Image (cartoon, coloured by chain):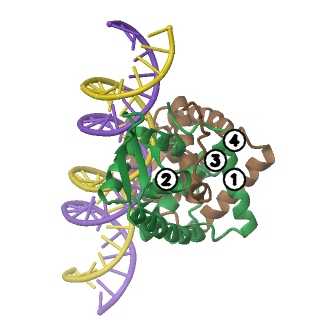
Chain colours: A green, B brown, C yellow, D purple
DNA sequence: GTGTTATCGTTGGTTCAAACAACGTTAGGT
DNA sequence: ACCTAACGTTGTTTGAACCAACGATAACAC
């Protein structure tokens, strides 16, 4: 019984975009775990948003990242304790927490970026540069036309 | 302050294949949740494998789906209780549980398939047929050249 | 044969992400 | 002044992925 059948996923699954996305996500998650702390993915997302768009409220952060206020709050608390962001109640609207990236956070973001780059290269290794670009375009098309938030 | 900025994800994230895969996966998961029970995704994977490859041991199932024995055991227990599969200790190797799909399970699989088809159509709506096919090819290339299991 | 190694199913536990509900606080609209 | 809505926060739930360990069984070495 040494008939080592190739472990090919069933055709019904290979045909599913959602299943493929799931597996690639798991793959990326595993690779990410080898290069950075487990919380690095979420941290990277929040810090990247703050760097590109400047200070934001937590709710706005959630809207731009497709995460709800709940998740953002947890990430923000962690980043705040690590001095990677600065949290302050907005004077104009005291309901809001204005969140800004700190210089320390910027350094942390850069570290995460280099680690992430290696993961992306490893993940997209079987693809040519043109193919990787096209894949990014196609996935972007899907994400652009679907609501980011569940509500 | 009615300047409703478009909620575009930061460029640093849009450039990441792993981020895109994560978001598409979440998107697919949400859509799936509207059409079938939450456990439908895992059930579909296991039943599809059994239908395509015939009876398998739980460990073999895990190897073909990229899930570890642990997860498979949970799914199999649930499917067994629902009479969707039949679990029996292999006579040739009494360590193994040979798992086979039942007629009832086949009907369940077909139901999940139709629900899944609608989700896929909704997910790939912004893409042309050719684009969707190419996306599937590119993701398949990545999955083919990466190990399915963590061990 | 006997002992070692490996596989399998199972149980239990940990971590993370996603989603929902509820509360007090604050703004905005009427 | 009233009602509605948004915000931050806390808590809970669910599913997925992963790791560690155990008894049972099998395969292999000697």
| Residue depicted at 46% across the width and 37% down the height | B84
Label 2's element?
Answer: helix
Label 3's element?
Answer: helix
Chain bearing tag 4 is B
Question: What residue is shown with label 4?
Answer: B124
Q: Are the residues flagged by discs 3 and 4 from a single subunit?
A: no
Viewer-proximal residue among A3 and D10 = D10
Instruction: Please tell me how crowded label 2 is: few (under 14), some (14-19), or many (20+) other residues with Cα within 10 Å.
Output: many
Viewer-proximal residue among D26 and A139 = A139
Chain bearing tag 3 is A
Chain bearing tag 2 is A
User: Of tags 1 and 2, which is closer to the observer?
Assistant: 2
- Residue B45 is labelled as none
How far apart in space, not on screen, are marks 2 and 3 (Cα)? 31 Å
Query: Disc 3, disc 4: CB below 8 Å?
Result: yes
How many numbered marks appear?
4
Chain bearing tag 1 is B
Query: Disc 1, disc 3: CB below 8 Å?
Result: yes
Q: Are the residues flagged by discs 4 and 2 from a single subunit?
A: no
Left or right of residue B55, residue A140 in this image: right
Question: What residue is shown with label 3?
Answer: A17
- Residue A50 is labelled as 2
Question: What residue is shown with label 1?
Answer: B136
């Amino acid at each position: 019984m040494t008939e080592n059948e190739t472990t090919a996923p069933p055709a019904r699954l290979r045909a599913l975009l959602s299943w493929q996305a799931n597996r690639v996500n798991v793959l990326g998650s595993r690779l990410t775990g080898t290069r950075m702390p487990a919380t690095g993915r979420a941290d990277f997302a929040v810090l990247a948003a703050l760097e590109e768009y400047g200070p934001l409220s937590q709710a706005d952060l959630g809207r731009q990242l497709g995460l709800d206020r709940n998740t953002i709050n947890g990430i923000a608390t962690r980043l705040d304790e690590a001095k990677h962001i600065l949290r302050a109640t907005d004077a104009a609207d005291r309901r809001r927490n204005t969140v800004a990236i700190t210089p320390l956070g910027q350094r942390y973001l850069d570290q995460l970026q280099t680690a992430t780059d290696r993961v992306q290269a490893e993940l997209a290794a079987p693809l040519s540069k043109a193919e990787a670009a096209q894949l990014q375009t196609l996935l972007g098309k899907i994400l652009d036309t679907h609501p980011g938030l569940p509500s």
